[in-house]
Image: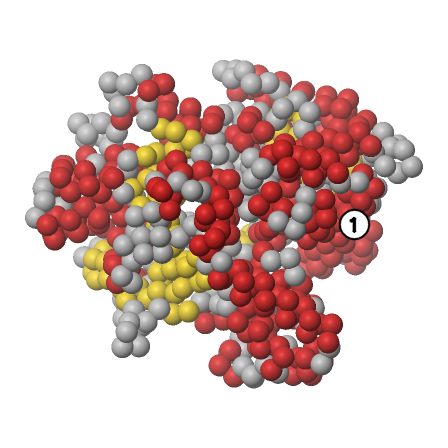
Amino acid sequence: MIETVEQPNKKTLAAKPVLPFPLQPLERLSWNYWWCWSMDGASCFRDIDPAVWEECEHNPRLLLARVSEYRLAEMATDPIYLERVHNLAGSFDRYLSERESLQKGWSTSSAVQAITPEKPVAYFCAEYGIHNSLPLYSGGLGVLAGDHLKSASDLGLPLVAVGLLYHYGYFRQRLNREGWQEEFYGETDPTQLPLHQVAETDGEPLLVEVLIRGRMVRAQVWRADIGRVALYLLDTNIAANEETDRWVTGHLYGGDRETRIVQEMLLGIGGVRLLRKLGITPCVYHLNEGHSAFLTLELTRELIQSQGLTFAEAAKQVKQSCVFTTHTPVAAGNDEFAIDLLTRSFGRSYEAELGLSHDEFIALGRTDPQNSQEPYGLTPLAIRMCRSTNGVSRKHGEVSRTLWQRLWPEETIERVPITHVTNGVHAPTWAAPLIQSLYEKYVGAAWQVQMRNRDLWQQGIERISDEELWAAHSLLKERLIAFIRQRSFLARANRGETSEYTEAAQNMFAPGVLTIGFARRVAGYKRWNLLLKDPARLLRIINDEDRPVQFVFAGKAHPQDQEAKLILQQVARWESSSGVGDRSVFLQNYDHEIARQLVQSVDVWLNVPRRPLEASGTSGEKVAINGGLNLSVLDGWWLEGYDGTNGFAIGNEIEATETADVDAGDAESLYRILEQEVVPLYYDQEKGLPRKWIAMMKRSMATLVPEFNSDRMVAEYARRIYS
Ligand SMILES: *Cc1c(COP(=O)(O)O)cnc(C)c1O
């Protein structure tokens, strides 16, 4: 099942020395992911020993265990460093103690106030992207979930989250010398991470049990602290399980359909049982994507068993406490299972406990209950069992109403009860500390709060001096270039390129050159090949003598998608082709860390999805927070964000029917905007300052940040969806 497993250099944490007493607050800080979005958090750990920090993939617990005794002693006797640790620990303690006042700050509604630590929101998702040291995510969905938890914590919204602990996570990517993608897995050892194993009151490990495929599957539970939010992770990798069942939480999206349904039973059914064992009674269950939809069945089963209700009566009650967010704009993107797989996985006892016949049980997952040909879909199940369904942008709400209108055959599309909450990103996670310090200076120390007040925010941004903004951005770009050189050097050395070519990585890219980033999954609708439609024209843009352009690419292809891998190979080979020189790079293994490097530093973020298939997209929002400009097709969030002055729009909003025509039109529009708008505006500089460009950066920050951040998103969920 696993191809290669790279074992991290194992050194057990059990032998960990006690930290010198002035550094002891770091131990406490290392156990809560709050550090990863506090301004000096990462740097406080990094500065102990930057080389070990890299080696540990930015995992503070490992760092503290591995760093030399002498280094710790040195830091423990450095008064300037100790002051930083003291301040960081002080902020952390204040953060943890101020929940109540926070919630009152953004909502006075009694419905929101009714969400309490005793009756919190229960948030369910199959993946979480909190930080790159906790690799339990594959991409956008997980990173969004991570940002949701961080904002819930910042806003003081009581919320507990449930997910799975994947022992091997999602695949990691490297390219061989032919530019072909190879996959391998890293191992996630919970004992090396800031994860507390959850115990029963007698001290024994807490176990959750679910009958799956006729066997009792047991899961132990880990808790990660995300500021004030607890994230519980189910893990079946224990000796009490049969070998096959230990693999249930082996890989994220790595297995076949069977692994998927089994994981989803564990998440949904096991997740509810876990909350019961913890004594948590949520006021609302949020199904973030359909993966956790079985939780609605478990809630119904509980009511039937405890109160003797019929299925219909119980389901009606359950519906009042469940809300669903759909993330896919295409029918094929939704999770579906063959009926015999469903039957084998559940067995027959579960439907009996629900008081349903086999046909009735299956009908819950069909858009047309009468259609015996239809597979079992988790989206129809979730929509049916939840009181609210929403898409993740205005456009996606519309698309979802059309897609699922079948579930309300008597309603017109406009009247289908599916709404939208547009995705946002967590500002302190994604804004570079250097940009955050500008926000502090010009908007105010409480800039994250001011962000909610559009006028105050806008006035603050207008006050930022052009020189300072450009200097900060330029420094970040230099950091990106150094990062690109370092990563490329290592990648070339690792795949055995000639020493000359490997060395050349030290000189690639130049700081003054307009830099465009393009990083996303290599999937058909993301249209990686659009940019390469006319290679000669693109080369002219890149190699213009006075006004050159450089491109950074990153992204993973699905391991079974040969076509995607070919496109990737084409982009990767480009890097070494003579025509491009050193103005294009492909960064391997797109993850949270690479995303952070890119979004904080590029001048322009390119996105060319085929309309209307980008449900929302969030990477462009991360770029906007850092002052980068979006150059994107009007789809997903950008359709709401673009106002004609705060970035660039490719193509138009008209939905053409012939894919080839649309692609040709959008490619032409992309080249034309690059040649006639983006490049001239960037290079219109006066004493090294592109005044008009900087004005657009400010427009972008002023108009986009108040809207497309996850504090706004979570507050909107709390007001409109949860209460
Ligand atoms: C933000 C993010 C995404 C989502 O980006 P899109 O805009 O949906 O392409 C995916 N992967 C990582 C690592 C991210 O940080």
In the image, residue 196 above or below residue 231: below
The N terminus - image quarter: bottom left
Residue 691 appears in which quarter of the rendering? Answer: top right
Q: Residue at x 74, y 72 (%)?
A: 80
**Residue 575 location (% of width, % of height):** 72, 43
Along the line of sight, the residue nearer the viewer: 116 or 509: 116
Residue found 37% across the figure and 37% down from its top: 721
Label 1: element kind: helix
Image check: 148 left or right of 427?
A: left
- Amino acid residing under circle 1: Leu
Quadrant of the rendered image containing residue 664 = top right
Residue 558 appears in the picture as rendered = no
Left/right of residue 475 with respect to residue 382 in the rendered view: right
Query: Front-most of 35 and 457?
Result: 457
Residue 660 percent location from the top left of the image: 56, 19
Q: Is residue 329 above or below residue 722?
A: above
The extreme left residue here reads: 308
Disc 1 target residue: 475
- How far across and down, in percent of the image, does residue 92 sit? 55, 64
Q: Is disc 1 surrounded by few (<14), some (14 to 19) or many (20+) residues within 10 Å?
A: some
**Left or right: where does residue 87 sit relative to residue 171?**
right
* Colour scheme in use: secondary structure
Left or right: 347, with 71 as reference point: left
